[in-house]
Image: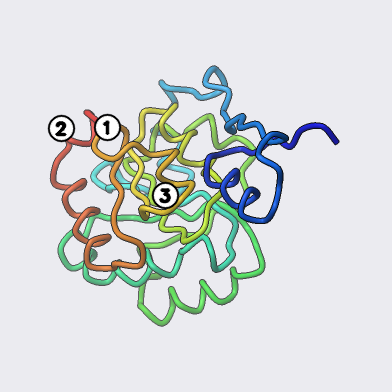
Amino acid sequence: YRKVIAISDHIAAVLTEGGLDPKRLEIIRSSVAVDSIDTTPDCATFRREFGLESHHFVVAMIAQLIPRKGHRFLLDVLPKLCDLYPNIRVVLFGGGPGEAQLRELVMRLSLDDTVQFAGFRENLDDYLACIDLLVHPGGQEGLGGAMLKAAAAGVPGLAFDTAGSREAVVHGETGVLVPPDDLGKLQQAIGVLIDEPEMRRAL
């Protein structure tokens, strides 16, 4: 081969550290088709489909149901957030081998009325803009296509400040980054974004 394409600076660094000749390496970041995102969707239909009321604050995760995506971090901070913000609702989009374990965690934390598993949806672009906040607490990410889609839909992203994610979210400009695995900061950031609609709009 003459060239290897990396989808982010992070992946390029991993490949270089693994011994790839930098002269053979090019970075072409993953992207999303902005025109495919409906920025004026029918949110009433979206809310009916997912049993959401107009006063609910909708948090979404869009990721495979596997450990490195960090679903457990969001679920772990939800009980305290629910006490402070009873109107919060969480929709988990995606499928994967970790679904049974995550469902068990939802049951154990008594989050049945707060969290729903939406599975894989081919038409997600049609109503992504109806979501209030995208949370992506993954510990490892090549770049983070879901965060790019959220940005295209005008939805702020909240992620751990890890390689890959920090290339998809510009802290303070298109979203918020918090220290990896810091549940206190994660909970605090979600609370601030619920309390500050003007901040969400700016992001």
Badge 3 density bin: few <14, some 14–19, many ≥20, Cα 10 Å: many
Q: Exactly how many numbered labels are in the figure? A: 3
Type of residue at label 3? Ala
- Dot 1 or dot 2, earlier in sequence: 1
What amino acid type is highlighted by mark number 2?
Glu
Indicate the position of residue 143 as horizontal and vertical percent values.
53, 43
Question: How far across and down, in percent of the image, does residue 24 sit?
Answer: 72, 35
Residue sitting farthest toward the top? 35
Residue under the point 40% across and 44% down: 166
First along the sequence among labels 1 and 3: 3
Tell me the element at label 1: loop
> Tag on residue 198?
2
**As shown in the figure, which amino acid type bears the numbered disc 1?**
Glu
Q: Quadrant of the C terminus?
A: top left
Q: Residue at x 65, y 49 (%)?
A: 15
State if disc 3 and disc 1 touch (CB < 8 Å). Answer: no
Counting from the top left corner in percent of width and height, residue 195 is at: 14, 46
Q: Are marks 2 and 3 in contact (CB under 8 Å)?
A: no
On screen, 35 above or below 26? Answer: above
User: Label 2: few (<14), some or many (≥20) within 10 Å?
Assistant: few
In the rendered image, the vertical position of residue 157 relative to residue 84, given as above or below: above
Res 76 quadrant in image: bottom left
* Pointer 1 residue: 173
Assign the N terminus to one quadrant of the image.
top right
The residue where tag 3 is placed is 60
Of residue 49 and residue 146, the one placed in the foreground of this image is: 146
Q: Position of residue 68 (x, y in %)?
A: 54, 64
- Within 10 Å of disc 1 (Cα), the crowding (few <14, some 14-19, many 20+) is few
Between the residue at mark 1 and the residue at mark 2, the CA separation in whole angstroms equals 13 Å
Mark number displayed over residue 92: none
